[in-house]
């Protein structure tokens, strides 16, 4: 399970500037097992269904559409899980029940870049979904 404040997640902020300037080939580093990918995909699907149920309840009770805007966070969580299942996961390798820290600074830098790309893509998906939910009658 990912812990935001873990040293693995933020370890790259202390990389010397000479290493920061190195070119890193853009490859997707798969760092979770197929079982972990299935768990993330299942969570994403469950979160999406839950979000649609919450949206349906808000619409059924004719709640002010502005109350639909916090659905952004639910859509975002769903999209992050979906893209993690498809692409990457943050800062360490999780194979089965064991988690292995990534020691190679170049690989860690690439994984960190992938993590931010996943978060950004998820936001780009969540924002239009939220806007659609907002404009529904």
Image (cartoon, helix red, strand yellow):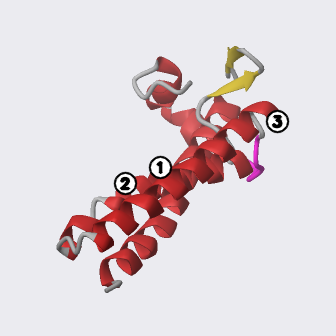
Q: Toward the viewer: 49 or 7?
A: 49
- Disc 2, SS: helix
The numbered mark at residue 77 is 1
Question: Which quadrant is the C terminus positioned in?
Answer: bottom left
Horizontally, residue 136 falls left or right of residue 22, namely left
**Separation (CA) of disc 3 from disc 2:** 26 Å
| Image location of residue 39, percent across then percent down | 69, 36
| Image location of residue 7, percent across then percent down | 47, 19
Q: Which residue is found at the position 60% from the left and 43% from the top?
A: 43
- Disc 3, SS: helix
- For mark 2, what is the residue? 73
The numbered mark at residue 12 is none
Q: Are marks 2 and 1 in contact (CB under 8 Å)?
A: yes
The numbered mark at residue 34 is 3
**Separation (CA) of disc 1 from disc 3:** 20 Å
Q: Magenta residues, as a range?
A: 24-29
Is residue 33 in sight in this rendering? no
Q: Which residue is found at the position 71% from the left and 25% from the top?
A: 93
Mark sitting earlier along the chain (1/3)? 3
Q: Mark 3 packing: few (<14 Cα in 10 Å), some, or many (20+)?
A: some
| Image location of residue 80, percent across then percent down | 54, 50
């Amino acid at each position: 399970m990912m812990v935001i404040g873990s040293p693995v997640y933020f370890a790259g902020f202390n990389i010397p500037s000479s290493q920061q300037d190195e070119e890193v080939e853009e490859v997707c580093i798969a760092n979770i097992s197929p079982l972990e990918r299935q768990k993330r995909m299942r969570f994403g699907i469950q979160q999406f269904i839950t979000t649609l149920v919450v949206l349906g309840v808000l619409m059924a009770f004719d709640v002010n559409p502005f109350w639909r805007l916090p659905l952004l966070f639910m859509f975002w969580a769903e999209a992050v899980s979906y893209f993690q299942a498809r692409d990457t996961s943050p800062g360490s390798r999780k194979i089965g029940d064991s988690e292995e820290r990534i020691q190679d600074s170049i690989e860690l830098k690439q994984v960190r870049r992938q993590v931010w790309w996943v978060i950004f893509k998820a936001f780009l998906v969540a924002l239009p979904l939220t806007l659609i939910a907002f404009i529904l009658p």
